[in-house]
Image (spheres, rainbow, N blue to C red):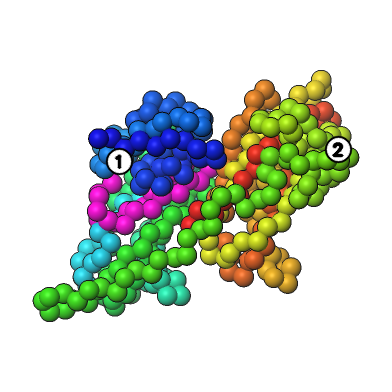
Amino acid sequence: MATTYTVRTGDTLFEIAVRFGTTVEALARANNITNPDVIRVGQVLTIPEAGEAGEPGGTGETGGGANQTRQVRGLLYRISTDRTSFRQGEPVRITFSKTNVTNRNITLRYRTAQRFELVARRVQGLREVWRWSAGQFFAQVTGTVTLRPGQSQVFRVTWDQRNNRGVQVTPGNFVIEGTNLAEDLAGESVATTISIRAFGPTPTPTPTPIPTPTPCPPGNILANPGFERWPNPSAPPTDWTGSNLARSRLSETGAFAAELGDSPGARAVLAQRVNIEPGRIYELIWRARERVRPGVARFILFVEIFYYDRAGNFVGRTEPRYSQENIPDNRYQRYSLSTGRVPAGARVADVRFTFEPAVSNTNSVLVDNVELRCRF
């Protein structure tokens, strides 16, 4: 009997795919979903059987091994190995893929002929022991790759368990990390964990279990994400700070949305600080649309996450930006970004939307339903 799942409030297709060990594109195909960003509460989804969740075009993953996925700006990253436990010297077969899970083309731009990187690190201390590109030469030429909706790039590599000096690694637990080297995505990766055990006498001793990380806290860690608590129209919404904001009824859901650029020729800020954990990966999700007025649309929307330590010292940040061409003017669009691994020492995240208009700008940006969720 086929497995089914009923969509609940707050669910996304990505979260459901991760929960059932499948992919967004496999779920979309199995349920005739044309827009992976749109599912409705109460919708009953058919979960593909094992073996049906491979990449399109016959490039499916090998089952039975370590397998992790994460979504980065419309790309579903997946890394897998043929097994989770290996004897010393046995080849480790690694598959790293990136799949366009949006309904639009995604063009990836590269500075060299190298398209990806794979790295093995010891779990304890995350010290690098092997890098796929070590000793290889890549032409220093730029290039582009365009992925159509549902299309994938798949890379398969075999690691012989030797380190960067050509020496067999000693037994232990290892993180295998895959990275896309496209411009603006070079720091985004996905990782899985394997175990290498000593070649012992029969019967083979039980290998040391791979440490299980503390599960991510569930749900959205931002307060008042839909701006429904906004008692004073002349002040920012409850739990948020900011300036040049308006309480708008042009919301995606609920009563209100936050309008950045109440005065469209002036800078606007909307921000909230929350506690986070270093080393984890978070996903920021938000919905935005443009409010069109007579005149000229010319602005930049910065979507930033600033990281601070317990003493309030700056540690790092994540910073994509969007111009008026990237934001629709007649409907809300869902956006998301992955933080990558939060820098060591970071304890506070400042989620910040900054609206920077040109002098002649007459339009503003509406933001609604902002989420920050721990993914790994």
Where in the figure is residue 47, as x and y percent of width and height?
34, 37
Q: In this view, does 125 lie to the left or right of 235?
A: left
Q: Give above or below for 35 relative to 270.
A: above
Residue at the limit of the structure toward the top, as seen here: 294
Callout 2 amino acid: Pro
Residue pointed to by mark 2:
233
Residue pointed to by mark 1:
54
Number of numbered discs visible in the structure rendering:
2
Q: Is residue 362 visible?
A: yes
Magenta stretch contains residue 74: yes
Residue 288 occupies quadrant: top right
Residue 272 numbered tag = none
State the quadrant of the N terminus: top left
Q: Give above or below for 148 relative to 234.
A: above
Q: Give the range drawn in magenta.
A: 61-82
Mark 1 neighbour density, 10 Å: few (under 14) some (14–19) many (20 or more): some
Where in the figure is residue 301, as x and y percent of width and height?
71, 40
Question: Tag 1 or tag 2, which sits nearer the N-term?
Answer: 1
Residue 170 occupies quadrant: bottom left
Q: Is residue 98 visible?
A: no
Q: Is residue 230 left or right of residue 309?
A: right
Q: Is residue 179 left or right of residue 341?
A: left
Where in the figure is residue 195, as x and y percent of width and height?
30, 68
205 vs 110, nearest the viewer:
205
